[in-house]
């Protein structure tokens, strides 16, 4: 199980150190934890998490190696600050910054070239789901956002229905089961059948066990609940329970 914390543009730096220290103090068998903090916090978080087993990642990177791109961050800079991974194509990046599948694929290619692992986000809007297009939208995002040359062991997919992010609405188990099966099927057709597929969107301690019981769910990308140490810890504990059930099956 992979449980990733997406802090987005939170919390204040004064709180971030204590939160990372709480992550570092916990252990959960069978769970790989990843923290995506704001880029300016990476070096400090890297020191806090040193030796804890919690991996560090950037929330985005530019598609170019370097150059005149004011305000952007290069994949090599993330790596130099202690990140081993980068989150790409989050729906907030797609919505707020007009990121297209092609741009996400270009960023992923650059990040992989710098030795980073990539977590690529896909997910449909409520209108797309209501129109019956959810699976077509998601598979087309996979097709366009995964670069042509990819190392399967450095790729993770996060399925995040846009309407479930930060809203408290969670996709139903049937919806998650169907979409994860469709994603798994698509990946298997490209020789990427072993790539982990996480669920994201209002994952909380109260719903994590149910979500992790879905066979194709390989973990979670957690936003709001990752900002409370005890909630993130409870979600990781649910991940450890799911990993134990899987190992004994
Ligand atoms: P949420 O965010 O858990 O607050 O819904 C998830 C995400 O956007 O990655």
Image (tube, rainbow, N blue to C red):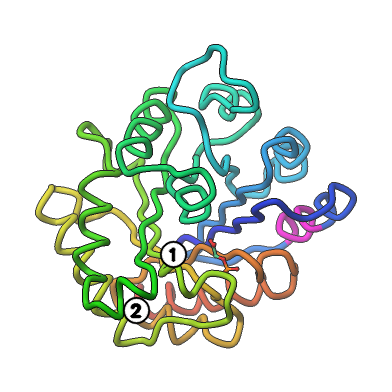
Q: Secondary structure at mark 2?
A: helix
Position of residue 93 measured from the top left corner of the image (x, y, whole percent):
50, 48
Measure the C-alpha gap from mark 2 to mark 1: 14 Å
The prevailing secondary structure element of the residues shown in magenta is helix
What segment is highlighted magenta in the picture?
Answer: 19-25
- Of 65 and 23, the residue lying toward us: 65
Report which quarter residue 234 is drawn in. Answer: bottom right
Badge 1: how crowded within 10 Å, few (<14), some, or many (20+)?
many
First of labels 2, 1 by sequence position: 1
Position of residue 97 measured from the top left corner of the image (x, y, whole percent):
51, 43
Residue at far left of view: 189
Residue pictured at 47% horizontal, 68% vertical? 200
- Labelled disc at residue 161: none
- Of 96 and 29, the residue lying toward us: 96
For the C terminus, which image quadrant?
A: bottom left
Position of 169 relative to 6 (above/below) = below
Report if residue 23 lies within the magenta region.
yes
Residue 249 visible from this viewpoint: no
Residue pictured at 9% horizontal, 54% vertical? 189
Front: mark 2 or 1: 1
Report if residue 230 lies within the magenta region.
no
Residue 214 visible from this viewpoint: yes
* Residue with the mark numbered 1: 1
Q: Quadrant of ligand 1?
A: bottom right
* Residue with the mark numbered 2: 248
Q: Are the two marked residues, 2 and 1, in contact with CB atoms closer than 8 angstroms?
A: no
Position of 16 relative to 82 (above/below) = below
Residue at far top of view: 67
Position of 95 relative to 38 (above/below) = below
């Amino acid at each position: 199980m992979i449980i990733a914390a997406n802090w987005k543009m939170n919390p204040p730096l004064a709180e971030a150190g204590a939160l990372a220290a709480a992550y570092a103090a916990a252990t959960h068998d069978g769970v790989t934890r990843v923290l995506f903090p704001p880029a300016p916090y990476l070096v400090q978080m890297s020191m806090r998490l040193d030796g804890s087993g919690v991996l560090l990642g950037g929330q985005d990177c530019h598609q170019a190696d370097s150059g005149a791109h004011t305000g952007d961050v290069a994949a090599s800079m993330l790596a130099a600050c202690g990140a081993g991974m980068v989150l790409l194509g989050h729906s907030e990046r797609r919505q707020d910054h007009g990121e297209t599948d092609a741009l996400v694929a270009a960023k992923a290619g650059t990040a992989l070239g710098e030795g980073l692992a990539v977590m690529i986000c896909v997910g449909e809007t409520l209108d797309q789901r209501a129109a019956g297009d959810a699976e077509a939208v998601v598979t087309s995002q996979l097709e366009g956002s995964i670069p042509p040359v990819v190392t399967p062991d450095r790729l993770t997919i996060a399925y995040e229905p846009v309407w479930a992010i930060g809203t408290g609405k969670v996709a139903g188990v049937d919806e998650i089961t169907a979409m994860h099966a469709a994603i798994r099927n698509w990946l298997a057709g490209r020789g990427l059948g072993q790539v982990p597929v996480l669920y994201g969107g209002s994952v909380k301690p109260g719903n994590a066990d149910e979500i992790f019981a879905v066979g194709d769910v390989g973990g979670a990308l957690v936003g709001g609940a990752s900002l409370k140490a005890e909630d993130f810890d409870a979600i990781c504990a649910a991940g450890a329970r799911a990993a134990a059930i899987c190992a004994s099956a």
